Image (tube, rainbow, N blue to C red):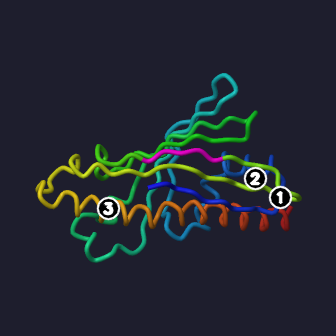
């Protein structure tokens, strides 16, 4: 499945980019499907900043997926490389459930857009049903499709929610500044 979102935030590019990169923890209160984010590491190297963040999600789980996915399984590790000279971040998500079966990666580009910033998020989500452990092979395809449908309905909205969270955060902090 292709992941594709475009959002616009009415603040200058350098501020939006730095907020995404450096203020993620402060954005959590604006993200209804995220309980918390733990920064595992941050390393600067050759003009790039490498982050490893662990996300802990929540929210409603559809009945058919409840047998497979629990709320504790709605955690993932995000590996992101931020390129300040290009205003981009390349990311890869490692799910904590079905780790070997799920591939999700992409790139966000931050672009000047009039008096604001446009964020283009592009990526890919694929599920290999044969790598879903503990599921009989004869239903692996159905389970894989259910997991992919469930995750796909979360990823794009979450990308949009992070943009909304950044926008709300910046509005509140520019008023109080």
**Mark 3 crowdedness (10 Å alpha carbons): few <14, some 14-19, many ≥20:** many
Look at mark 3 in the image and give the residue it sits on.
Answer: 147
Q: Earlier in the sequence, mark 2 or mark 3?
A: 2
Query: Quick one: label 1, few (<14), some, or many (20+) residues within 10 Å?
Result: some
Query: What residue does disc 1 label?
Result: 116
Residue 96, position as x, y percentages in the image: 34, 50
Q: Which residues are magenta?
A: 104-108
Label 2 belongs to which residue?
Answer: 16
Hey, which residue is sitting farthest top in the picture?
A: 46
User: Neighbour class for label 2 at 10 Å: few (<14), some, many (≥20)?
Assistant: many
Image side of residue 14 versus residue 168, left or right: right
Q: Are marks 2 and 1 in contact (CB under 8 Å)?
A: yes
Instruction: Name the N-terminal-most of marks 2 and 1.
Output: 2
Tell me the mark number nearer the camera, choosing from 2 and 1.
1
Structural distance between the alpha carbons of marks 3 and 1: 36 Å
Viewer-proximal residue among 48 and 153: 153
Residue 39 x, y percent position in the rendering = 53, 45
Q: Is residue 125 above or below residue 45?
A: below
């Amino acid at each position: 499945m292709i992941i594709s979102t475009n959002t616009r935030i009415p603040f200058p590019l350098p501020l939006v980019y730095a907020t995404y990169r450096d203020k993620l923890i402060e954005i959590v209160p604006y993200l209804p499907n995220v309980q918390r984010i733990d920064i595992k590491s941050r390393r600067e190297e050759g003009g790039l900043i490498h982050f490893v963040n662990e996300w802990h999600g929540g929210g409603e789980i559809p009945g058919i997926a409840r047998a497979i996915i629990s709320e504790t399984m709605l955690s993932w590790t995000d590996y992101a490389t931020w390129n300040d000279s290009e205003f981009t971040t390349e990311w890869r998500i490692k799910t904590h459930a079905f780790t070997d079966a799920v591939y999700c990666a992409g790139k966000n580009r931050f672009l000047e857009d009039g008096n604001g910033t446009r964020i283009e998020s592009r990526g890919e989500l694929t599920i290999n049903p044969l790598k879903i452990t503990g599921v009989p092979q004869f239903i692996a395809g159905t389970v894989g499709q259910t997991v992919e449908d469930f995750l796909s309905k979360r990823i794009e909205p979450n990308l949009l929610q992070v943009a909304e969270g950044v926008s709300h955060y910046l509005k509140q902090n520019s008023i109080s500044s």
